[in-house]
């Protein structure tokens, strides 16, 4: 049977981007994304947020670290990955997204601007897309 694993998310970063490097020199970062949805509850519309953890690799991680910060609107395309580990004798798991494509949305001045950043960036790169393939199989983040 065929399978398909693709996720497309549009939301805002929940924290500043911190890029790390594997021992082999590959950039990696874990970002949080808040995806909001309006739902009607008892004759009233309310915002519900879903929080998603996303891992970015390579050049995509570097670009995110350079141009994005908390509150930045982004579109991320990737795949689901189940992380499993054992802690204190208990098996734990968490469903994450491995981001393979990142598109910055909006302007630099609208939410999440870093101090000292070049505001002209938004004019030239408002729809910048960063893509990188999946991480090498032999590289495991820390």
Image (cartoon, helix red, strand yellow):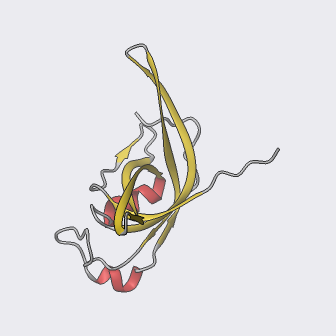
Which image quarter: residue 63? bottom left
Horizontally, residue 80 falls left or right of residue 108, namely: right
Q: Outermost residue, top direction?
A: 89
Towards the viewer: 52 or 59: 52
**Residue farthest toward the bottom in the current orientation of the protein:** 123
Query: Whole-percent x and y of residue 116?
Result: 17, 71
The answer to which image quadrant residue 69 occupies is bottom left
Q: How many labels were placed on the picture?
A: 0
Residue under the point 34% across and 68% down: 44
Q: Is residue 84 left or right of residue 89?
A: right
* Relative image position of residue 49 (x, y in whole percent): 37, 57
- Judging depth in this view, the residue of 10 and 68 nearest the camera is 10
Which residue is farthest right?
Answer: 1
Q: Viewed as shown, does residue 31 lie left or right of 127? A: left
- The image shows residue 86 at horizontal and vertical percentages of 45, 20
Q: Residue at x 62, y 55 (%)?
A: 6
- Height in image: 40 above or below 1? below
Who's the residue at 48% across and 44% down the image? 96
Q: Is residue 9 above or below residue 57?
A: below
Q: Give the residue at the far front of this rendering.
A: 42
Residue 95 in percent (x, y) is at 50, 41
Q: From the viewer's perspective, is 4 left or right of 73?
A: right
Q: Quadrant of the C terminus?
A: top left
Task: Look at the image and tell me in which quarter the N terminus lies.
Answer: top right
Of 123 and 83, nearer the camera is: 83
Write the residue at 30% across / 51% down: 18
């Amino acid at each position: 049977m065929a399978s398909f694993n693709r996720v497309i998310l549009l939301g805002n970063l929940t924290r500043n981007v911190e890029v790390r490097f594997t021992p082999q020199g590959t950039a990696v970062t874990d970002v949080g994304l808040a995806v909001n949805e309006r739902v009607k509850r008892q004759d009233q519309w309310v915002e519900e947020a879903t929080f998603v953890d996303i891992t970015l690799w390579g050049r995509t991680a570097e670009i995110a670290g350079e141009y994005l910060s908390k509150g930045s609107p982004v579109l991320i395309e990737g795949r689901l990955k189940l992380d499993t580990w054992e802690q204190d004798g208990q098996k734990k798991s968490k469903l994450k997204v491995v981001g393979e494509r990142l598109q910055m949305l909006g302007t630099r001045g609208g939410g999440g601007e870093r101090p000292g950043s070049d505001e002209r960036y938004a004019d030239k790169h408002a729809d910048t897309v960063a893509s990188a393939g999946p991480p090498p199989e032999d590289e495991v983040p820390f």
